[in-house]
Image (cartoon, rainbow, N blue to C red):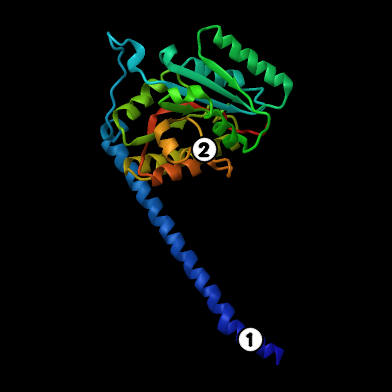
C-alpha cells in the first residue's frame, strides 16, 4: 500500500515538478547563451568599426583658461580605502598624488581602516610626506569598522570638504592609476551631463606570474570586453567595479550615496544610480594597474 502511494505521488507530483525545473533551466541557459552571443557580436562590431567612447560621447581635453587660470578645472576628490595594506599603501598613495591635475583643484582622501598601529603610523608618515610636497591629502580614520569598505566610503563622504568637489575618483589600495588618468576620464563627465560614471579597465602588473594569475586575467578581460565595453557601446547598464572609476557626486547623492547594508556596495550603488536614469561609460583605452592574487 505504501509503495503504491509513493509511486502515485512520484508520478503525479515529483516527476512533473522536476521536468518543469529542467525546462526552466534550459530556458535560462538559452537566454544566457543568446545574451553572450549578442554581447560578443557587439564586441566584434566595436573592434571592426573602432567605436571608441570619444565617438559616442563628447570629449575635449581640459585647457587652462587665461583669465580664470585653474578655476575652470572642477574639484576632484580621490578616495583610497584601505585596511592593513602594508605591502601596497605607498604605491597607491603615491600614484594618486602623482595624478596630473591642478593641486588646488585636487583632494586626496586616504580612508585608513587599519587596526595595526605600525601600519597606521606608516600611512600617516606617507600622507605627511606628500602634504609637504603641496598635495592636499587627508588621512581619515574611524573608531570602528562598521560596514567595512562601504562604511569607510560612506563616512568619508561626510567631511565638509567633500561638498566642494564635483567628481570623485575611487581606487582600491592595490590599484595604481596612470598620471593622466583624470585628464582622460573627467572630460567625459564635464561635457556629457547625462553621464554619472566613467569606468576604466584594469591592466594587471603580475598577470604572467603563474597559472592562477593568467586564469584571473582571462576571466576579467572577458568581463571588461564582453560585458562592460559591450554595455557601454549599447548605452546599456553595466556595474561599477568598485575601483578605477570616476563618479559624478550629484548622481551619487541623488541615488542616496553609499549603503553599508551590503558587501557589494559597488553594484548596489550602480543599480540605484542607473534606476535614476543616469548613464555609464567604459573607457577601454584608460587602464589602472592592480595586483592579482597568486597565493605564493
Instruction: State the quadrant of the C terminus.
Output: top right
51 relative to 12, above or below: above
- Disc 1 designates what residue? 7
94 relative to 276, above or below: above
Locate residue 265, reporting x and y percent: 53, 40
- SS for dot 2: loop
Q: Quadrant of residue 274?
A: top left
Q: Is residue 277 left or right of residue 28?
A: left
Question: Going 59% across and 32% down the picture, which residue do you hit?
Answer: 152
For the question of whether residue 165 can be seen, the reply is yes
Residue placed furthest toward the front: 160
Instruction: State the quadrant of the N terminus.
Output: bottom right
Residue placed furthest toward the right: 117
Q: Quadrant of residue 165?
A: top left
Locate residue 46, reporting x and y percent: 31, 39
- SS for dot 1: helix
Locate residue 193, reporting x and y percent: 31, 33
Question: Going 55% across and 6% down the picture, which residue do you hit?
Answer: 132
- Disc 2 designates what residue? 258
Label 1 Cα neighbours within 10 Å, binned few <14 / some 14-19 / many ≥20: few
Q: Is residue 68 left or right of residue 291?
A: left
Locate residue 272, reporting x and y percent: 44, 44
Amino acid at each position: 500500500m505504501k509503495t503504491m502511494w509513493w509511486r502515485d505521488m512520484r508520478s503525479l507530483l515529483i516527476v512533473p515538478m522536476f521536468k518543469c525545473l529542467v525546462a526552466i533551466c534550459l530556458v535560462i541557459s538559452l537566454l544566457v547563451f543568446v545574451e553572450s552571443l549578442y554581447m560578443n557580436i557587439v564586441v566584434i562590431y566595436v573592434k571592426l568599426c573602432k567605436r571608441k567612447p570619444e565617438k559616442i560621447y563628447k570629449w575635449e581635453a581640459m585647457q587652462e583658461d587665461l583669465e580664470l587660470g585653474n578655476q575652470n578645472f572642477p574639484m576632484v576628490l580621490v578616495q583610497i580605502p584601505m585596511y592593513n595594506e602594508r605591502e601596497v599603501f605607498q604605491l597607491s598613495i603615491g600614484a594618486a598624488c602623482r595624478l596630473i591635475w591642478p593641486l588646488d583643484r585636487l583632494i586626496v582622501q586616504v580612508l585608513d581602516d587599519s587596526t595595526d598601529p605600525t601600519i597606521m603610523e606608516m600611512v600617516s608618515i606617507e600622507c605627511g610626506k606628500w602634504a609637504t610636497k603641496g598635495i592636499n591629502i587627508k588621512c581619515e580614520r574611524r573608531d570602528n569598522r562598521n560596514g567595512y569598505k562601504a562604511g569607510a566610503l560612506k563616512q568619508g563622504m561626510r567631511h565638509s570638504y567633500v561638498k566642494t568637489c564635483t567628481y570623485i575618483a575611487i581606487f582600491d589600495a592595490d590599484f595604481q592609476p596612470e598620471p593622466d588618468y583624470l585628464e582622460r576620464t573627467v572630460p567625459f563627465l564635464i561635457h556629457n551631463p547625462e553621464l554619472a560614471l566613467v569606468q576604466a579597465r584594469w591592466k594587471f602588473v603580475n598577470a604572467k606570474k603563474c597559472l592562477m594569475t593568467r586564469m584571473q586575467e582571462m576571466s576579467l578581460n572577458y568581463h571588461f570586453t564582453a560585458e562592460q565595453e559591450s554595455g557601454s557601446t549599447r548605452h546599456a547598464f553595466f556595474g561599477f567595479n568598485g575601483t578605477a572609476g570616476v563618479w559624478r557626486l550629484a548622481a551619487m547623492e541623488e541615488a542616496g550615496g553609499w549603503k553599508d547594508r551590503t558587501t557589494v556596495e559597488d553594484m548596489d550603488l550602480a543599480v540605484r544610480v542607473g534606476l535614476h536614469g543616469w548613464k555609464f561609460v567604459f573607457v577601454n583605452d584608460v587602464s589602472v594597474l592592480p595586483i592579482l592574487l597568486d597565493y605564493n
